[in-house]
Image (cartoon, coloured by chain):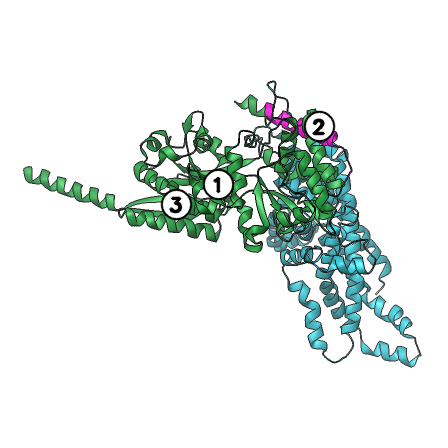
Chain colours: A green, B cyan
Amino acid sequence: MKHLLSGLTTIALLMGSGAYAERTLKLVEVITSPERTEVLQGIVDDFEANNADVKVEIVSLPWGQAFEKLATMVAGGDVPDVVEMPDTWQALYAGSDQLVSLGDHVAEWEHGATLTEKTVAMGSQAGDLYMIPYGFYLRAMFYNKKLLAQAGVENPPTTMAEFKAASAAVSELEGKSGYCLRGGPGGTNGWIMFSAAMNGTNEFFTQDGQSRINEPGSVEGIQFMIDMYQDGNAPRDSVNWGFNEIVAGFYSGTCAFLDQDPDALIAISERMPAEDFAVIPMPVGPSGKAFPTIGFAGWSIFKSTEHEDAAFDLVAALSAPEANATWAKRVGVIPIHKGADQDPFFQTEQFKGWFDTLNGEQYVPTTMPTYLEQWGYFGSTVVLETSQEALLGQRSAQDLADEWAELLTAEYAKWQANQ
Amino acid sequence: MPGETRARRSLYWQYMVEPFLYLSPAIVLIATVMLIPLTIGISYSFQSIELLNPFNTGWVGFENYQQLWSDRKFWIALENTFWWTFWSISFQFLLGLGLALLLNTEFFGKKLFQALVFLPWAVPTFLSALTWAWLFNPVIGPLPHWMASLGILSEPYNIMGDPELAMWGPIVANIWFGVPFFAITLLAALQSIPGELYEAAEIDGASSWQIFTKITLPFLAPMIAITVMLRTIWIANFADLIYVMTGGGPANSTQIVSSYIFTTAFRKLDFGYASAIAVALLGILMIYAVVLLWLRKKLVKI
């Protein structure tokens, strides 16, 4: 009996240590590109080197189908341990109680204290931390120094009025325009930001559930964009421009202002000398405030994981200041740790605009109401078609705003009814 | 008489049952790959099917069609579809016919020329759309500058940003893309015309215009009718170039019915309404095909 017991214990120990050596974590990344995967693999390789008993398997989903694929994986029981979580899905997965609450882990983590307040706030849902964001896609304004100098504009604009005046001055130059307006795909953020700046608030709905997009202030913001185009302060074909065109319009020197996230910096800094351009916060409206849109993604752990501690070690390794700085530089996002702005890379004039935005009282980052069912359709189709009609002078700003408000109010009512 | 019934029965068997028995594999095949999806598609157009509203489904009768009737965007798209198809097919046909006539003669380097003519057909649509989109871009493309120098445009700008002219961007790309199809098929038809007819016409002293209108055109007519019909239906449904080049914009000025179906189904996720638009498009194209086939029967007497 004694022998049997000790034999069993030995076997159990062996099996235990065997299992211990074979801990495998599945990491699903959802916003992929070959270069990103390479950077991620590099960080993961370091993690594996420091944790010999853990293997990490990276699964890359193409962004276009990532939502359906991950949902299918989770529904089918093939749940990853660690997942790259975009802001727009956080509510869904955290709300359905699928994610590990990371609050306690972070409290014990050596770098937990240096996470910026915004990082913790953005990663939290109903008071619990469900993801550690790895960086922010925040809007700020690129400007072309040479063009402004040629147009006789001394200081880059800080208010909407100055922005308009500077754009008009640049547009006087032969073949140049002020603003790289995004009239085509993905232009929604611009309309939302400018209407919020002029309206002095980034709330999407009133207490009684009415959309605020057709309040007089918002309509003024929409009119501002229309005027920019119709007064010739933006290139004529910018009515059709999407991401590639506005970025190309900026680095080719066709237009002097571009509002974009830091990921545009990758393409621009390759083609433009650093001394020719800089980045400033978005211009503020009459209320003295600006509401740049913010997007983010981060790392979450699924509750079903069998190796929660190892999974957190991996998330911690990915989010550690050094790894995060590498990631942020290569992917083009704002890093998440306090003091990251002291890194020489982020101290350039190019990055200043984003850190000024994050630290400035007058800048209030805006998250889109992605919880509305039809938000995707609204952004990709309704705004695109109707705003082009308005830019081309086929309908008025008020008309446009009323149509948007009607759709958003109805969607919000639907959402509230489901709560 | 017992014999009579047997004969009638065998006649019935011979003409009503037996042929369909032999045809049954084909009938089953056609039914599974064509008729069943078609029926399902048509039935969708009488239902409410919204992917984001799975519980709000059910039969709604003609509601989708009533909505269609008062849908401003549908009528814009229909008009755009007409111009898009009309100009694309006209230029493709005329240029294709010209090329076929040229390629039907003998000249130095014909083989190389022939290969070049067919090249656009081999380029993936997506690639040709992107290439043409960049050619029309004044920052890096030459076309706006050439057009401005020729006095067609007042200044070099991108015509795809101008709602009046935007449709011409995809149309030009489509002409370039589709000419080889007409050239190939019409060349094949040209080569099947017996040479003796031309010899006889020459002996009789016919002018080249007479030869073209009295011999070449009548012989080509059946091929022209069938290719024009096929291509019309094809082009009316062909939204790839438009989708890549302008995305239906600006302000719906290049939206055609088939791209409108796509956005309704896959952006708005409203499959019921998208099916109703699709059925409307199907009906219009069927009427067109019937008219063209009737015309072909009237005009072609060979």
* Residue A179 lies in the magenta stretch: no
Name the outermost residue toward the right.
B205
The amino acid at mark 3 is: Ala
Q: Looking at the rendered structure, which numbered label has been put on residue A402? A: 2
Toward the viewer: A384 or B172?
Answer: A384
* Residue A409 lies in the magenta stretch: yes
Name the outermost residue toward the left.
A2
Residue at label 1? A334
Dominant secondary structure, magenta: helix
Q: Is mark 2 in CB contact (under 8 Å) with mark 3? A: no
Q: Looking at the rendered structure, which numbered label has been put on residue A323? A: 3
> Magenta residues, as a range?
A393-413
Label 1: element kind: loop
x, y percentage for residue A220? 70, 30
Q: Earlier in the sequence, mark 2 or mark 3?
A: 3
Q: Could you classify mark 1 by the number of other residues whose Cα lies within 10 Å: few (under 14), some (14-19), or many (20 or more)?
A: many
Viewport quadrant of the C terminus of chain B: bottom right
The amino acid at mark 1 is: Ile
